[in-house]
Image: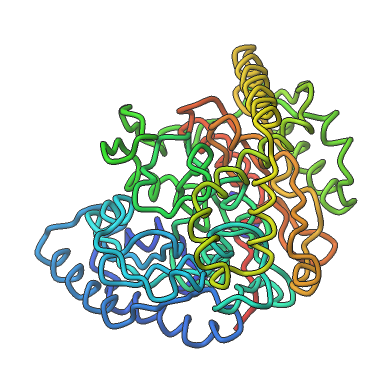
Amino acid sequence: MRPGAGIAMPLHYCTLADTAERVRAGALSPVRLTRECLDRIQALDSRLHAFITVTADRAVEDAAIAEREIRAGNYRGALHGIPIALKDIVWTLGIRTTAHSRLLQDWVPAENAPVYEKLRAAGAVLLGKTSLHEFAYGNPVRDEPFPAARNPWNPDYAPGRSSSGSGAAVAAGMCFGAIGTDTGGSIRHPAAVCGIVGMKPTYGRVSSYGVIPLASDFDHVGPMTRTVRDNALMLQAIAGYDAKDPTSVDRPVPEFGAEIGQDLRGVKIGVPRRFLESLPMDASVASVFDEALRVLTDLGAKIEAIEVDGLGPALQAGAMLVTRQAYEYHRENLALHPEKFGKAFRERVLRAATFTEEQLNSAREARLRLCAQIREIFASGVIAIVSPAKEFDAETMQSLYDDPVDVRAGTIRIHNLTGSPALALPMGFDSKGIPAGVQFAGPHWSEPLLYGVAAAYEAATCWTDHHPKID
């Protein structure tokens, strides 16, 4: 048993898996569980701003329905009666979907996104819609229509990139899981700095129809939870082919938790050491990452250095392609309603108008070269690539307000360019006392294997047993 395991947790910090078992057995009422989360939101969200919209009355009604169904023997599975949240770019019928923007401040979609429909079919209880950065891009800014989310470990610090509200809500015990989106790290970065688990599945694994796009070639939808097993349970509910989504891949959905409990003896894990050494990595993050590698080695994994040529330029090329696609999506509204967009968002996206076709073609070629190299690495027998999920100490909200366009990125963005699944989970704390995260990425469609690797690491450490003292 890992250090700290077995310590009694308050209900709001219990795992989704354990809570689901109590709900299934009739030992815990979904209504009580939902009210506990709503009370938590009411007590904390004036400081954390994790939610834009809270659907309290509807949540209690849905919890009561779930409770009746379970009592009648109609149990749907691990998410039945479990309170969750959605990033506020996921369409919700009858509930506004703002994208944290003035343009959509009061917009109510005419249908649900398939990812939400799948959660509803699984019996999950929606608590509300979580904060993000404007249209899931950039940093918090002072002129936004809703307050920016704060980190529950210390509200003076940021809770990560655009799935910030989802990360803060899960970490603070406001919900048992949340949906985030990830175009350049925006599930994994908040997971890292909030001390939770975030999975960016393989591109095409989860439908992105009904999710307001940032850059459709790179957008991923995925779960954010407190533990690896919880994450696998949530992905189980939302994965699958969707004919409405042109990026969706018609591929069987495996049992995502099947590899949890397997050991790592003889498993080859690659580290992009040369690239990591080229980054201005903060000493505290480097230290806890070295300790994470030691833990993996002690578990029997074989850590090998891997080389990825031209990684820095490839990441810059990826940023160019994302910005260009964001520009194409928003170009008409930027021309018609420039006042509806924040200044930092406008400046960042409008830069793409100056990109030449030659530059864009060069960026596409750099992406293809990177994808080919990563495929070769996995073909060589490396089953996962490990790196910090964030190479830098936590940023204060003030520093981001002062420089809202600057976005530092390291290895986290690689896997948006390749479409590979990548998962972040806690590996310790940085020098500011904010969580730091480790990232595991694998070949396409290898989510069960990644969950197995991450769960082995999680079981050997105590980091997922730590929770912010925000009460």
Q: Is residue 222 above or below residue 31?
A: above
Residue 202 x %, y %: 48, 34
Left or right, 4 with reference to 98: right
Q: Is residue 397 above or below residue 119?
A: below
Specify how the rendered protein is coloured.
rainbow
Number of numbered discs visible in the structure rendering = 0
Identify the residue shown where x is 67% and y is 23%.
370
Q: Which quadrant: the C terminus?
A: bottom right
Left or right, 459 with reference to 90: right
Residue 356 x %, y %: 68, 34
Residue 322 seen in render: yes
Residue 156 x %, y %: 74, 77
Asked whether 89 or 269 is in front, the reply is 89
Picture quadrant of residue 125:
bottom left
Asked whether 121 or 29 is in front, the reply is 121
Left or right, 374 with reference to 313: left
Residue 377 x %, y %: 66, 17
Residue 301 seen in render: no
Q: Residue furthest front?
A: 336
Picture quadrant of residue 22:
bottom left
Identify the residue shown where x is 66% and y is 56%.
463
Left or right, 93 with reference to 392: left
Identify the residue shown where x is 69% and y is 59%.
347
Q: Residue furthest left?
A: 72
Q: Is residue 239 above or below residue 304?
A: below
Asked whether 121 or 39 is in front, the reply is 121
Identify the residue shown where x is 54% and y is 50%.
198
